[in-house]
Amino acid sequence: MQLDHDELHRLLAVLADSDIQEFRLEGEDFRLEVRRDLPPSSLSVESVQSVAPDERTIQAPPPQLKVEPLVPSNPPPPVPGSRADLVDVTAPMVGTFYRAPAPGEPSFVEIGSRIGIGQTVCILEAMKLMNELESEVSGEVIEILVDNGTPVEFGQVLMRVKPS
């Protein structure tokens, strides 16, 4: 079986528009596997590889897809005692919460710290990327609800700030 570049793009486009979660196609000189696990609108080409080392490998750029925000299937853990005068700082993604830029270094903020808009308040690690979370409000940190190194969910309240 032969599969040229245009046919591969058409095949990936059809798969992107379908409900198919897993697809495997093998030819004499290639193997193509496509799997979708997480959000239904994402498509990943897991492997495109040659069966025989001297044969041609088909490589295709990833298909153009509409990406929608990931919404957790489980709601974030409940947070006790939310106060109306405080602003919740929530996790914009799933990841691991870190209070300091590196082990052994001081925390970005402590309870009672005064913060300003744009100031880094923590790091969320997601897929080996360190994402600094910046404050969207200025004020005083009243509560820090997550322990250092703890996994967090999308939308989970990390800390509360009393705006100034």
Image (cartoon, rainbow, N blue to C red):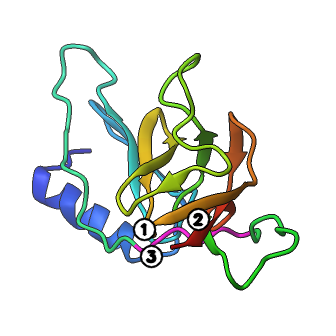
Q: Contact (CB < 8 A) between labels 1 and 2?
A: yes
User: Can residue 79 be seen by looking at this rendering?
Assistant: yes
Which label sits in the foreground, 3 or 1? Answer: 1
Q: Residue furthest bottom?
A: 84
Identity of the residue drawn at 63% across and 43% down: 110
- Mark 3 lies on a secondary structure that is loop
Instruction: Specify few, some or many for label 2: CA neighbours under 10 Å numbering under 14, 14-19, or 20 or more.
Output: many
Instruction: Specify few, some or many for label 1: CA neighbours under 10 Å numbering under 14, 14-19, or 20 or more.
Output: some
Residue 128 location, x and y as percent? 47, 32
Instruction: Specify few, some or many for label 3: CA neighbours under 10 Å numbering under 14, 14-19, or 20 or more.
Output: few
- The label on residue 89 is 2
Identity of the residue drawn at 52% across and 74% down: 19
Residue 9 location, x and y as percent? 20, 60
The image quadrant that residue 100 belongs to is: top right
Q: Is residue 133 above or below residue 10?
A: above
The image quadrant that residue 117 belongs to is: bottom left
Disc on the earlier residue, 2 or 3: 3
Q: Any magenta on residue 69?
A: yes
The image quadrant that residue 16 belongs to is: bottom left
The residue segment tinted magenta is: 68-73
Q: Foreground: 37 or 14?
A: 37
Which label sits in the foreground, 2 or 3? Answer: 2
The residue that disc 1 covers is 136
Residue 24 location, x and y as percent? 46, 48
- Quick check: 164 left or right of 48? right
Separation (CA) of disc 3 from disc 1: 39 Å
- The label on residue 109 is none
User: Can residue 33 be seen by looking at this rendering?
Assistant: no
Q: Any magenta on residue 163?
A: no
The residue that disc 3 covers is 18
Q: In the image, what residue type sits under mark 2?
A: Val
